[in-house]
Structure formats: C-alpha cells, structure tokens
Amino acid sequence: MNRTFSIIKPDATKRNITGAINKIIEDNNLNIVAQKRIKLSKEKAEGFYVIHKDKPFFNDLIEYMTSGPVIVQVLEGENAVDKYRKIMGATNPENADDGTIRKKHALNIQENSVHGSDSNENAIIEINYFFNENEIISN
C-alpha cells in the first residue's frame, strides 16, 4: 500500500461533480484517507506550483487554481501513484482513454478537473504540503 495526492480542481467543484470523481477513484480500489475542501490563496498556489514558475502558463495556472474551491485528498492503495494517473487519463482530455476522469469530466487541457502526483517522491511532498499526518486516517 502506498499513497498519492489528488486535487479536484475548481472547474469540477463549480460543476458539483466531486462525488462523481470520487466514485471513479473508489471504484478503482483507491481509498480516500484524507480530504478537505479549501480555497487556495495565491501564495499557497504559487508555492505548490513553484516548479512551473518560469513557464509561460504559470500565471494562468495560478489564476485558475485560485478561482474557486478545490478538494485536496490523500489516496491510498496498491501502486497508488500509477493507478491514479491511469484513472485520471491524459492531461489533454482529447487524448484521454475512455472511462478516465478527464475523458468523462474535463472541459479542456487547463480545466481538466483533477491533479495527481507524478511519482512516489512527489506524492510525499505534495501530501505534506497540505496535510499533517494526524489528518490522514487509513482504513
């Protein structure tokens, strides 16, 4: 068992589809072991996405991620990082496989409904950015 980090992004919370997304997660044998609805501040979003700081889309990304509430989550299961990345689908929903979160729910490449860690190492960093260990309750 290991953990990964997930964000249900503002486009999904605005459309009230967080339950539909969580159903896909749980139907694929990942347990939601921590979850909270937050409004990212500009500073918190910039800190989280600091690796993209010098990229041309950075300011648009920060504006989008602070435009409404998000759901930050810790998911737990066997090969959690790889499994969640497969469940999410390609960043561009046009390239995502049928049945994935992004194929079903994303609006476009930016408003793609979910974020997930890209490695076990980054999962730990991202989880620790939003959660204390006492907020994570394994089943």
Image (cartoon, rainbow, N blue to C red):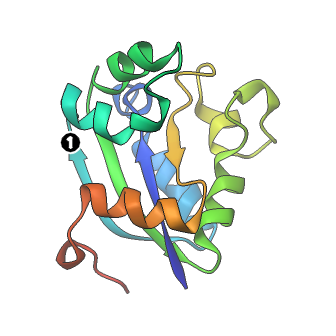
Instruction: In this rendered view, identify the residue nearer to me: 51 or 71.
Output: 51
Instruction: Name the image quarter holding residue 10.
Output: top left
**Can you identify the residue that label 1 sits on?**
38
**Callout 1 amino acid:** Ile
Find numbered disc 1 in the image and state the secondary structure of the residue it sits on.
Answer: strand
Residue 106 at what x, y percent from top left?
59, 28
Residue pictured at 53% horizontal, 54% vertical: 117
Residue pictured at 36% horizontal, 33% vertical: 13
Residue pictured at 65% horizontal, 75% vertical: 79
Residue lying farthest to the front in this orientation: 54
16 left or right of 121 in image? left
Residue 123 at what x, y percent from top left?
47, 62
Q: Could you tell me how many numbered marks the image carries? A: 1
Image height of 105 relative to 132, above or below: above
Instruction: In this rendered view, identify the residue nearer to me: 24 or 54.
Output: 54
Residue 54 at what x, y percent from top left?
48, 22
Residue 114 at what x, y percent from top left?
51, 40
Instruction: In this rendered view, identify the residue nearer to me: 27 or 122.
Output: 122
Instruction: Name the image quarter holding residue 94.
Output: top right
38 left or right of 74 in image? left
28 left or right of 17 in image? right
Q: Quadrant of the C terminus?
A: bottom left
Q: Quadrant of the N terminus?
A: bottom right
Image height of 7 relative to 68, above or below: below
Q: What is the crowding at mark 1: few (fewer than 14 residues within 10 Å), some, or many (at least 20)?
A: few
Residue pictured at 38% horizontal, 19% vertical: 64
